[in-house]
Image (cartoon, grey):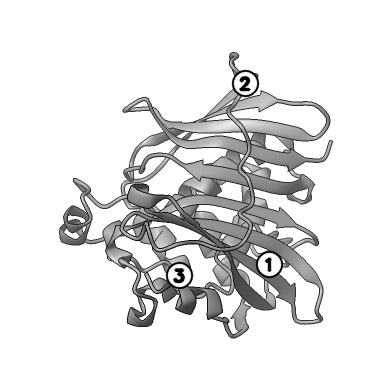
Amino acid sequence: MNLDTVRAHRFEPIWHEYDARDAILYALGIGYGSDPLDPAQLDFVYEEGLKAVPSICNVLAHPGFWAKDPKFGIRWMKILHGEQAYEIHAPIPPAGRVRGEYEIQAVEDRGDKGARLHQLKRLYAQDGTLLATVRSVIVMRGDGGDGGFGEPTPAPGPLPDAAPDEVVELPTLPQQALIYRLSGDWNPIHADPKAAKGGGFEAPILHGLCTLGLATRALLQTCAPGRPEALGAMFVRFSSPVFPGETIVTEIFRGEGDEVRFRCRAKERDVVVLDRGRARIAA
């Protein structure tokens, strides 16, 4: 990795115009509409009174796969999505024009374990209102030993050693990744079996941000039905891939005040796929 080039890089602001069709497509991509008679689901997939799922902030004004540019010297084929967090500052409209401003906050050098790159996005409405802050951690398995910079944002600690207070099961469709990718992530490992095998997977995998969207659904369904505006913040650590068609089991632990902890498992394999989850949900 060319650390000085990474440190000096400045992203141009990214403008993204989207409409109700895009908001509905995103919601369908994370499984909303599975019960078309449920008013809480129709809020996100029917244009009358349409609301945006809060986690749509992760895909709006996306910078693309910038790390693939040879000038950075990043071994991009060894990149994994490690963590994702978002904080909602104002309700995200179901249609509009938004601006994404990006910066690289830090790179952690982990030696023979690679490196972790911390990226920050601020998402603004056209009038300048700050809508959301989105943080991503990219795990660069082939780029350790090149040094680091900046102050990484610490992740939440482990989950409580106790039984969950609620459990929510949400199925995924075999074609789930093929729907979700229409919201902007065209990485072929989510669609092409040959590309998936080249990446070390037995079959195409579900996007990590799609699994995060499923966790968002589970939290809204359980902790804030009919109130997407109550979800103020969320964090997840991606711990294992999901295969389309698997059932995602979200285990929810009620905390003090408005804090909720959670994790997600792939039911069929009993594997934790999202870990150390934390959310802030207003009562």
The mark that comes first in sequence, 3 or 2, is 2
Q: Nearer the viewer, mark 1 or mark 3?
A: 3
Judging by the rendered image, the residue that carries numbered circle 3 is: 184
Residue 152 position (above or below residue 20): above
Where residue 229 appears, x then y in whole percent?
Answer: 78, 51
The image quarter containing residue 218 is top right
Residue at image position (69%, 62%) is: 133
- Contact, CB < 8 Å: mark 2 with mark 1? no
Where residue 238 appears, x then y in whole percent?
Answer: 46, 44
Disc 3 marks which amino acid? Gly
Residue at image position (45%, 70%) is: 184
Q: Secondary structure at mark 3?
A: loop
Q: CA distance from mark 2 to mark 1?
A: 36 Å
Judging by the rendered image, the residue that carries numbered circle 1 is: 94
Q: Secondary structure at mark 2?
A: loop
Where residue 200 appears, x then y in whole percent?
Answer: 20, 50
